[in-house]
Image (cartoon, coloured by chain):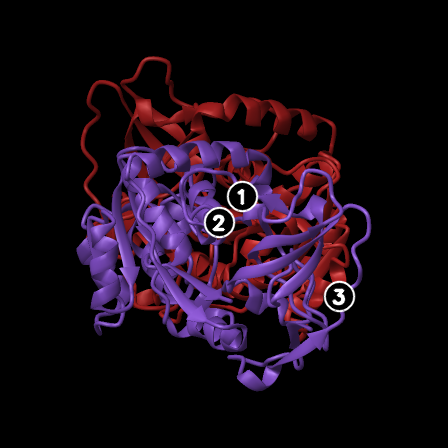
Chain colours: A red, B purple
């Protein structure tokens, strides 16, 4: 019997285990054009927190009492869809469960570009695309720019660091703790800020970026966004990707340096990765090339077993992951 | 003997009269290429508050113990510059004084487009250009857009309202008090928010803009910016022109709706009017045409006498002006 995590209550603030329940689900027989997938890897991502609220947004909210959705990689175990056969590896959006019936039109076979299957939930998937297009298209980062990226040890941030270095930029990253900072340095970051080290982010960034920053890739919001505003050069571009600091908070964001937007002519631009789905070929071309050239490193934090999935999700908000946070079934 | 207002102390928070002193100045004999101007109109503008702080910005700070500068319109009383003769009316940046010696290269003769001379410090000057280019170029506002503009009864805001209406947009303005709101309505604004009426700006804007806003022209910051974030439509563009709410404050700006930048893909773009000086012809062409067609109205709040200039300046921060605040000598 297949099982799926259901949203039982809409969390206020930080979610707890009692907001979720793992329950059996009835999977239908396959209709024409469908495949049955045994999931092997499930993705947890910060944006899922937003779907737990009952507000209109760019993705619809999870329904109360219903199974949740999310990225997944699995193996086709039964197919009534042309072009899909038993044993094919696919990615799809029916995650948070061990087995799924999926319209084949909403699943993609994994391209063969020499990376492990779970990379398609991380660096070669949505998080990677988010970093790649956010940096190059939204922030229009150019060789020679100084780029600041927060949550630089995360799935998105670590991609930003490596794409920026591959393109000849100077990179300042921020992460929590020495281990993460060391890892991001090993990816090529020129300077790192350990935001858990006790210095205010604005002070640390002023020291790390004496000549200012041209680009800020925001995964955090709050004090990181404020620090970036404080040191931004003229015509700096901010790609606003996430604000993990406030997803669980009812407190307003306090910005002391926001008026610098005016005199420095700063641009803040929000974006979501699905705006760039039509340009996926570009992404695979560059990332595939850099992968072959050994320019891309990946890290994963793997939690074992479906029953641990809420723990994995909650770990995102306490910074427990280095690189991509995954659940292995 | 000529007199000029000097900056005596750098104000903290709201400036007071004791921060300024009116003192005699020695004006030199004219060098080749210079003109002597008897000022008739002096401009006070919110951006001058920034120049009273000792921080690097897009305009250098006023020097302590020295005369201040600002927009002025006056009559040439002596000329050693080709093309300038006694009796010519000019605008220049040696304001905060009754008489000035100016390099003719830094003065402009007033074009004859059928408006009173002091209009070149307001709707046909920097404030007008700020509104015009901020709306049309920075925010890329298009016919059919719904535009929200704060401080809509000010020199910049009232231009934004009228340019937007001339271009076929829907306009929601905000101003303090019934008199100002009525005046902005008379300029063509479709709906007005009286921010002094007791309702929160976000609530008032949600009611005034049930279909959201496509453009926000920010003169105020703070709660107005937050309200605009709350109701912004997908791909809304914000032209960030000023934040009068915080010029005199050490408190951070609190934003509850800033994460909407991401899902709604909002763009915030700061700007300053001097970036558009090369496009002045465009501005005079459109504004001259609308003036002739009777589509532009102007309002002025005039304070009489050089000795009252600090009062006029401080009045900007208590909302004492309707339209452009001017000092007449």
Depth order, front residue of B263/A297: B263
Q: Is residue A295 above or below residue A270?
A: above
Depth order, front residue of B289/B241: B289
Give yes or no for contact between labels 1 and 2 (Cβ–Cβ under 8 Å).
yes
Instruction: Name the residue carrying label 1.
Output: B110
**Position of A232 compared to A259: left or right?**
right
Residue A111 got which mark? none
Q: Is residue A253 above or below residue B8?
A: above
Q: Please identify the quadrant where the N terminus of chain B is shown.
A: bottom right
* Alpha carbon separation for disc pair 2 and 3: 25 Å
* Alpha carbon separation for disc pair 1 and 2: 7 Å
Give yes or no for contact between labels 3 and 1 (Cβ–Cβ under 8 Å).
no
Instruction: Name the residue carrying label 3.
Output: B27
Q: Is residue A153 visible?
A: no
Give yes or no for contact between labels 2 and 3 (Cβ–Cβ under 8 Å).
no
Q: Quadrant of residue A18?
A: bottom left
Q: Residue at x 23, y 49 (%)?
A: B189
Of callouts 1 and 2, the N-terminal one: 1
Of callouts 2 and 3, the N-terminal one: 3
Chain letter, disc 3 residue: B
Classify mark 1: residues with Cα within 10 Å, few (<14), some (14-19) or many (20+). some
Front position among marks 2 and 3:
3
Chain letter, disc 2 residue: B
Instruction: Name the residue carrying label 2.
Output: B120
């Amino acid at each position: 019997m297949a099982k799926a995590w259901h949203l039982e209550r809409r969390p206020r603030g930080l979610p707890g285990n009692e907001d979720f329940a793992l329950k059996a689900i009835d999977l239908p027989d396959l209709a024409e054009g469908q495949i049955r997938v045994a999931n092997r890897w499930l993705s947890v991502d910060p944006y899922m927190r937003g779907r737990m609220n009952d507000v209109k947004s760019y993705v619809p909210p999870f329904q109360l009492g219903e199974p949740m959705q999310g990225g997944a990689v699995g193996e086709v175990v039964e197919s009534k869809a042309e072009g899909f056969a038993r044993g094919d590896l696919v990615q799809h959006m029916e995650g948070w469960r061990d087995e799924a019936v999926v319209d084949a039109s909403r699943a993609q076979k994994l391209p063969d570009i020499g990376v492990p299957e779970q990379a398609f939930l991380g660096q070669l998937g949505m998080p990677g695309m988010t970093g790649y297009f956010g940096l190059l298209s939204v922030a229009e980062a150019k060789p020679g720019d100084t780029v600041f990226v927060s949550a630089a040890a995360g799935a998105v941030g670590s991609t930003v660091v490596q794409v920026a270095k591959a393109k000849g930029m100077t990179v300042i990253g921020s992460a929590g703790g020495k281990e993460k900072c060391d890892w991001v340095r090993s990816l090529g970051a020129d300077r790192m800020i350990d935001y858990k080290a006790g210095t205010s982010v604005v002070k640390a960034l002023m020291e790390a970026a004496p000549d200012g920053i041209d680009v800020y890739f925001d995964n955090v919001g709050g004090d990181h966004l404020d620090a970036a505003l404080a040191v931004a050069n003229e015509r700096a571009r901010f790609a606003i990707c996430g604000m993990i600091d406030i997803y669980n908070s009812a407190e307003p964001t306090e910005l002391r340096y926001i008026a610098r937007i005016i005199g420095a002519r700063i641009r803040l631009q929000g974006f979501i990765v699905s705006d760039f789905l039509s340009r996926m070929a570009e992404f695979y071309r560059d990332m595939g090339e850099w992968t072959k050239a050994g320019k891309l490193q990946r890290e994963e934090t793997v939690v074992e077993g479906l029953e641990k999935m809420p723990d994995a999700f909650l770990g995102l908000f306490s910074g427990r992951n280095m690189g991509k946070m995954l659940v292995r079934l």
